[in-house]
Image (cartoon, helix red, strand yellow):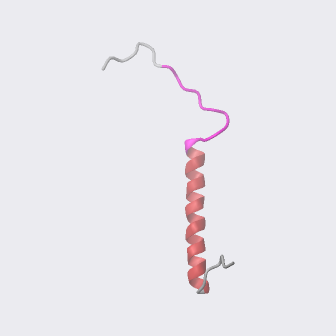
Amino acid sequence: MIDPPVVPKRKLPRYGFHTHTERVNGRWAMIGFIALVLLEFRLGHGLMNW
């Protein structure tokens, strides 16, 4: 494959979705979900009963 003579540099957007923020958000979501499952297991019933 032929490489272009000049490779443009990409600027990161000042707002919006970033890789690191999405990764942190996903990790906190997983921690929250596991905490909810453990809490329901400890209580013996579902926490979100209507």
Q: Quadrant of residue 47?
A: bottom right
Relative to 35, residue 7 above or below:
above
Residue 30 is situated, as x and y percent measured from the top left of the image, at 55, 62
Q: Quadrant of residue 11?
A: top right
Which sits in the foreground, 3 or 44? 44
Relative to 32, residue 23 above or below:
above
Residue 7 is situated, as x and y percent measured from the top left of the image, at 46, 19
Q: Residue furthest left?
A: 1
**How many numbered markers are drawn?**
0
Q: Residue at x 60, y 84 (%)?
A: 45
Residue 27 is situated, as x and y percent measured from the top left of the image, at 56, 57
Residue 36 is situated, as x and y percent measured from the top left of the image, at 60, 73
Q: Is residue 50 left or right of residue 1?
A: right
Q: Residue furthest bottom?
A: 44
Instruction: Give the main secondary structure of the magenta stretch.
Output: loop
Q: Quadrant of residue 19?
A: top right
Q: Residue at x 32, y 17 (%)?
A: 2
**Quadrant placement of the N terminus:** top left
Q: Answer whether residue 16 is magenta in the image.
A: yes
Q: Answer whether residue 49 is magenta in the image.
A: no
Q: Residue furthest front?
A: 50
Q: Is residue 49 left or right of residue 2?
A: right
Q: Residue furthest right?
A: 50
**Quadrant placement of the C terminus:** bottom right
Write the start and end of the magenta stretch as one range. Answer: 8-19
